Amino acid sequence: MAEEQQTDQQVEEFHPKGTVAILVMFVLAIIILWGSVYLILLSRGVTV
Amino acid sequence: MATREDSGKGTLTTYEVTKSDKRFIGAHILVAVIALSIGSLFGPLQAFQFSGVDLYPYLQPVFKSYYQGLTIHGVLNALVWTTFFITGFFTLTTIWGFKRGLRYPTLNRVGFWTMVVGLVMAAVPILLDEASVLYTFYPPLQANWAFYAGLTLVVVGSWIEGYGFFFTYRAWRKDNPDTRTPFIAFGGLATMAMWQFATLGIAVEILTMLLPWSLGLIEGTDPQLARTYFWFTGHPLVYFWLLPAYVSWYGMLPKQAGGKLFSDSLARLAFWLFILLSVPLGFHHQFVDPGVPAGWKYIHAVLTYSVFFPSMLTAFTVIASLERAARNRGGKGLIGWVRALPWNNGSVTAQLLAGILFMFGGIGGLTNASYNVNLVVHNTTWVPGHFHLTVATAVTLSFMGISYWLVPWITGKPLWKPRWAVIQAWTWFIGMLIFSNAMHVLGLLGAPRRTPLGVAPYVPEEWSGHLLRVGLGGAILFVSAVMFVWIVAKTAWQRERLPVGAEVEIPVAESMQDPQLTPRWLDRWVPWIVGTILLILVAYGPQLVDQIANIDLGSGQAPTIRPW
């Protein structure tokens, strides 16, 4: 019990909401830019 | 002089770095900056050449060709600047992390001088235009034997320096059996351990094929096997460059920004995963190689994407650490806290901007690793556009940022014109944004890499605007590189010294969570090292056996090409 209390004191509470928002934007940027490369290449037609 | 303070658990809490240690670290940084200075002279020459301004004829007879310049640029900036900076920086993180001197300082000095001898040995044939084979030195392009021997010595020297860190760790561990390895020291050790595995490929390539071939002891070489050996080392080489920047981003930047490391556990887990996953994925550089079966390319492609996981761990942990720092400084809003970071600090700004551009480097890397996209862009300017965002920005701009506190710490002198350091970081950011974007777009348009496009007769009109942007970006980057070297040199050579009591502090971030609460399995080497060896054996073993069994070192395999 005493050990648990000590553990709680040693861990600071912090919720990085802004970080999650930035990473969501990053994942969206990945999808958009990656997808756009496929679209650019597909727009040139297929190579047989 | 070292001082020792024992906390009662065998843990040293203070350590005064000796002048000798500082001089040793400074020697690494000096060689690194000299290499960057010379290598950077050739960057704009390549970029201007793209935009139709070919300055190489004016450099005759000293420098003979675009390819000689590209080799100097690549070898000095990608291999020498990085390796010397990294080993110097890790000397500091080892000493300061463990709060003790190197266990065998002579060993590390032997390693350093081995690297210096290797550098000189490789530089001579490069400067004589007898090794214009670029920093990837693919056979059948053949360089003078001294080039290969010199690069071997640079790698061996870095191994020896790594052994020095490992012996220091062993001595520390003996005194501290139950203490978690201090993070900045752990990061250096993990990187050097990964490097030991990674460089086996290039060591075997040079010692069994390129060196005997260049000495005329064997008739020919096997380009396919050589490329497999090279990329065994070549991709983890990227992590050898990146992980020291991560040590700073995780373990130092939060302190500089006024905060703490968000999670010691996540930081260590990311490093272990990079050790595990960095090596067994080199075939994603060989998607266009006909000698590698498609199944193995697929396996390496999957492993390549698995590196996305520790990369995202890094992004999350570093950004969360910065968010916490910014909110401590009064930052508000979901994203607005970014403005509260200390953007007036050149060291911080350089590393923040390096991280921002690295996110785009990651997107380009993921895209490039897609098999079908890679078939289109592999031999185009997309690839140098990508690695200028990684090694030339995430790594180089971070190292520049680290230099802005490291050089004042080594010399005991204040940073010369700190405002200039901020401007230097922004000029690098802007120059690279223009340069790399143009290179990526040109790659999608089919512009070949490793090609002096300024004299190519086949350049279509739609490339011309982008080629001009390459030249413009290169010019801005050159100005920025000159500013960096100038700031660092003026800092080191000025007469003004920091007053007593105002010495530069080495920024080591505390963790929000007591590192002793980090699970023990994240501080144990054996399972991770065994896992790494097994994964390498599975991912590379069968193909290496097959390619070695079919090796042909006769002259019929590939004609020797001496490109000068």
Image: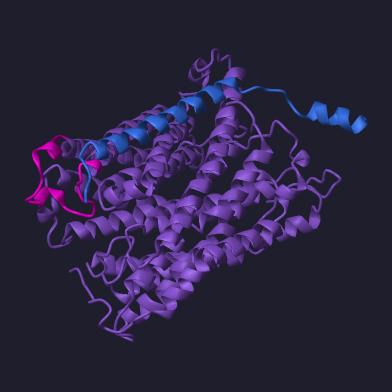
Question: Residue at point 56% right, 50% down?
Answer: B274
Q: Where does residue B350 sit, x and y in percent of width and height?
A: 43, 33
Residue B312 to residue B134: above or below: above
Q: Position of residue B508 (x, y in %)?
A: 63, 37
Residue A5: quarter of image: top right
**Residue B446 within the segment the image draws in magenta:** yes
| Above or below for B5 versus B416 | below
B398 is within the stretch colored magenta: no
Tell me which chain appears blue: A
In-image side of B51 versus B526 (left or right): left
In the drawing, does residue B298 fall left or right of residue B461?
right
**Residue at (37, 30) in percent of width and height:** A32
Name the residue nearer the viewer: A20 or B78.
A20
Q: Is residue B390 visible?
A: yes
Q: Position of residue B498 (x, y in %)?
A: 53, 35
> Does any portion of residue B411 appear in the rendered image?
no
Q: Position of residue B446 (x, y in %)?
A: 20, 46
Q: Residue at x 46, y 25 (%)?
A: A25
Give the magenta part as a residue range.
Answer: B444-465
